[in-house]
Amino acid sequence: MCFTSNLSIILAFTGVLLDISYGNIMPETPLFDPKKGRLIAVSNRTAVDPNARAGGLAVALWDTLVETKGVWVGWSGRVKDYAGNKLQTKLDDGVEFALCDMSKIQYEEFYLGYSNSVLWPLLHNRLDLAVLDNKFYEAYCEINEKFAEIISGISGKDDFIWVHDYHFFLLASYFRQKNLEAKTGFFLHIPFPAPEIFRALPQHDIIGRALCDYDVIGLQTDNDVRNFKRFLSEDHNGEVISDEQMKVGDRIITIRHCPIGMNAPEFSETANSKMAKDAAESLNRFLGGRQLIIGVDRMDYSKGLPQRFEAVGRLFDSYPKTHGNVSFTQIAPPSRSIVDEYAHLRETLDQLAGRINGDYGDLDWIPIRYLARSYSREEIAGLYKMADVCLVTPLQDGMNLVAKEFIAAQDPNDPGVLVLSQFAGASEQMNDALIVNPHDTDSVADAISQALKMPIDERKTRWAALYKNICEEDIVWWRKRFFAPVKTITSEIAATK
Ligand code: ADQ
């Protein structure tokens, strides 16, 4: 019996984490059987904790890996004084997790530093917030190399390595240095900006070249694809050789437009669960029959929360009939709260909510409620379902799955209305929503008013078109689009369905 089977059986019975030094794995006893040609996903955060299977990336990967019985490599979430080269593995529902720790310095310089304070703002067009410190880049290289080392210890040539997001731009170039034969793909969950912005990154040249070491690159929107192709042709002499292929030096890479989706019918069921109904009932008690506007986001400056609060304030300024009749509830748990910008954002939101409630609130009416905590997927689904309007108004967003979840949760006979930013990737597919410019406070306030008053027939027509789209272009569709160019892995994945 091979090591994989033994490990799987042990883990299935115990459910515990095992420590295995990847440096000690002998080639003849690989952690995962390379003959099977497994799907190995790599992302910084994984869904090893079942409670973490709620975010966009986590849901998308979890479903795919459960179906393909794949492997998920990532950060354990632990920060140690010294993070050695130890792998911790866990088997859950057929998915094998292979996780490693980070040292304090790596956490500060790779995660909080280069990933969150350089790449995240820059790729979201917030050059003003990017902290361009070269020592962060050294830690970024170190972690990318460490993951490349780990993956070369557990993968075989028939595996497909599916790398996710901006934390791992350099991984494929380290794979090539280590002569890894497996095919590789990269999916960017966040926007790829105009080359003029990307060039402000001191390492834009190295990162551009490193990206060309992937075989397939998936991006969320047509705009991202256009930006990326323009960057490759202008900065790397990339030649377009077909609709989806470019030749850069001696590499031919496939660049695909793959907007991420979700499992809409499953989420509709979630919105009908007991937990969902209980959450809706408690919010209903607070509302006392008023109309509900809802916002659900991670607290992040890309989500445009201050601009959204201003727009709700403008709604109360411009439409007095809303007074006492409409309440806005924003759910935004703090994320990456150590980074100064997030603390500042929290303060701004507290001040704005305080001002609007001070100006308009009454003994029996709180115009804006801001809940800085996380809720379960079921609770969120229940709240979406009872809301009359959902505000998804990021200043820049790769896709934004909240927009899709809100539509999936609606009652077809009495659906709510989605107000969606033109800068969310989702707006490309969801043009039956009320599309707004989040910087234009008056027009967002007008769109909210239009949504609150929208006749039932128009609500139903818009909702039906949106629901059809999210069902057709769902999570399986997304995965198939990404894997279509990779013939070997496509047949493996198709066979598991
Ligand atoms: P995110 O920005 O994290 O990731 P997003 O698409 O906005 O992802 O989805 C957020 C998810 O978190 C949703 O599933 C939502 O229900 C959940 N969520 C948000 N607030 C919550 C709360 N308060 N309590 C519980 N759950 C909450 C990135 C990109 C996105 C892209 C995704 C997927 O930034 O643009 O859509 O990846 O590719």
Image (tube, rainbow, N blue to C red):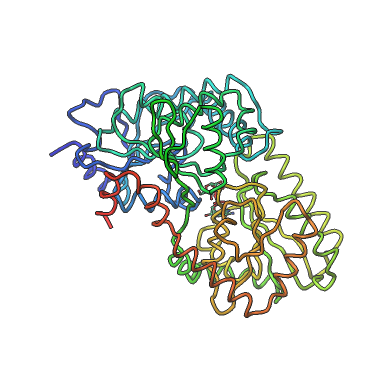
Q: Position of residue 2 (x, y in %)?
A: 15, 37
Q: Quadrant of the N terminus?
A: top left
Relative placement, left or right, of 103 versus 318 is left
Q: Residue at x 37, y 52 (%)?
A: 480
Relative placement, left or right, of 34 versus 319 is left
Residue in front for this viewpoint, 215 or 297: 215
Residue in front for this viewpoint, 459 or 371: 459
Q: Position of residue 229 (x, y in %)?
A: 52, 37
Figure check: 424 above or below 5: below
Relative placement, left or right, of 355 versus 332 is right
Q: Quadrant of the C terminus?
A: bottom left
**Corner quadrant of residue 245:** top left
Figure check: 172 above or below 452: above
Q: Position of residue 403 (x, y in %)?
A: 58, 59
Residue in front for this viewpoint, 81 or 105: 105
Q: Residue at x 82, y 70 (%)?
A: 323
**Corner quadrant of residue 277:** bottom right
Figure check: 359 above or below 130: below
Q: Residue furthest left?
A: 1
Q: Residue at x 31, y 52 (%)?
A: 93
Q: Position of residue 429 (x, y in %)?
A: 54, 59
